[in-house]
Structure formats: C-alpha cells, structure tokens
Amino acid sequence: MSDTKIDFLIEKAKKLMSLSRDPIHDLSHVQRVVHNAERISTAYQLTKEECEAVKLAAWWHDVARVLTRKPSFVWMACVDDILSAIMLCLHSIRYGFWKHSGGIATKLILSKTVGTGAVFTKLLLTKRERILIHILRDSDMLDIIHIDRLTRVCELSQTSKKYWWGFRCLLLYNTRESAMRMKTSIAHHYLIESIEAIIQWMEERQHDPRYARFFEEVWIRESIKKFKLLHRKLAPIQQSI
Ligand SMILES: [Fe+2]
C-alpha cells in the first residue's frame, strides 16, 4: 500500500474517532493504542506491509463507537470489533485498499473480537500473522490502565453513577493476573511500568480530599494492595515472544 493510501485511511479513522461520544473510546484512546502498536512492533522484524496492517488496525479498531450516541459499557464491547472490521473492510474495498494492508488489518480487528476472536484467528490468520494480533491486543490492553484514561474515568465518576461503578469494576477486573497477561514480551515490560505508575498515581491521591468521594480510604488502600500484588506476580514472568 502506498504511503498516500494508508495516510488517507488513517485520516478517515481520525475524523471518525473525533466524532466519538464514548469518552473512554475516543480519539485520544486510539492515538495511545497506535503509539503502543508502533513501539511494540519495533521489537519484531515485521515487513513494511505488516507494520502498516497493525497501524491501520490500531487506528480503526474502535471506529464503530461512532455509530451510536449512547455507547454502552456492555453491548458495544461485544460487537464493536466486528462493526469496526466491517467499516474498515468497506472503506478498503471502496478506495481500492483491500489488497495488502487493508485486508490484513480487517482480519486483525475481526480476530480481536470478544468471544469469537479465537475462531477468527484460526480461520483467517496465517501462523506468521498471529504475532500481529498479539501486538494489536496488547496495545489495546495496555491502555486500560493508562494514567490519562484512568484520570478521565475518575473525572467522569464525579458526574455519573455509571462511570462511578465502571471505574470500580475496571480496577477490580484488571487487578487479576489472568486479565492483564500480555502476549508479547515488550508489552509485558510496558505493563510493569504502567502498574508502577498506577500505584504511584493512587498513592498520591490517597489522602487528597478532592478525591475523597470516589476514593474511600479502605477501598483505595485495598486497590493499591491489589496492584502491588499484581506487580509482584507479573514482574518475574518472562514472555517467550
Ligand atoms: Fe480500544
């Protein structure tokens, strides 16, 4: 795919994501996922086409969030990958980008689908292409506990009960070792850095009265403990890829 063509598709994704009404799946989230994908990709000897496919998939992976005015925590998470893949597929075909990176990027997003991703991975991806889905998944997962995103959810918690609960569920779910296992060794390294940053972030706010409403002392103390335990469990692990 020529540089002009991939730039066109990236610009299209940027425009669409700037319309997102989902405050935690917005343009800034996608930009961080793209940044993660680029820095993880450099650790592997990918071809130009493979690098482009991962980058394109990262830009388009949440584009379906713009389809609704009321993005839900639950149902959208179940279908957004499939819808995003269809949107990228249609744009790729329409503008003659399907061959090469457009097609692979579409398959990567489909293979990331909640529930059916493993089946799509087996059906659609070659053995070589499987490293690409690992990079895409890890890039997205890493942003779950990014400080900027947590700060955003924390701010939203002040005005919305949904986000107040969402924030708690997010931390509860993501302090489990199985939920935060990265596939690639480089992403694992970035994850450990993120956990350290989050512990510091919470400790700094632990006694700040501005955060007292959603950081009850007992709750934040328990959360810090969970992240420290997670860090102790994950830090010694050596990833194979
Ligand atoms: Fe995402």
Image (cartoon, rainbow, N blue to C red):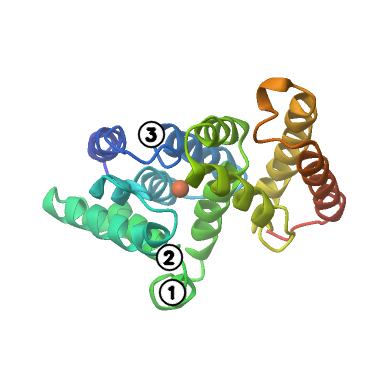
Image location of residue 50, percent across then percent down: 43, 51
Residue ID for mark 2: 113
Where is 52 relative to 3, above or below? below
Q: In what element is the residue under mark 1?
A: loop
The residue tagged 3 is 27
Residue at left offset 65%, top offset 47%: 187
Q: Residue at x 74, y 37 (%)?
A: 216
Residue 51 seen from this side: yes
Position in image of residue 223 (x %, y %): 77, 45
Which is more toward the observer, 16 or 36?
16
| Element type where label 2 sits in the image | loop
Q: Is residue 225 above or below residue 116?
A: above
Furthest-left residue in this view: 94
The amino acid beneath tag 2 is: Thr
Whether the residues at callouts 2 and 1 have beta carbons within 8 Å, the answer is: yes
Residue that appears at 68% across and 46% down? 186
Give the CA separation, mark 2 to mark 1.
6 Å
Residue underneath mark 1: 116
Residue 13 quadrant:
top left
Classify the position of the C terminus by image quarter. Answer: bottom right
> Which mark sits nearer the N-terminus, 3 or 2?
3
C-alpha gap between disc 3 and disc 2: 20 Å
Q: CA distance from mark 3 to mark 1?
A: 26 Å
Amino acid at dot 3: Leu
Measuring 66% from the left and 21% from the top, which residue is drawn there?
A: 210
Q: Is residue 45 visible?
A: no
Tell me the SS state at disc 3.
helix
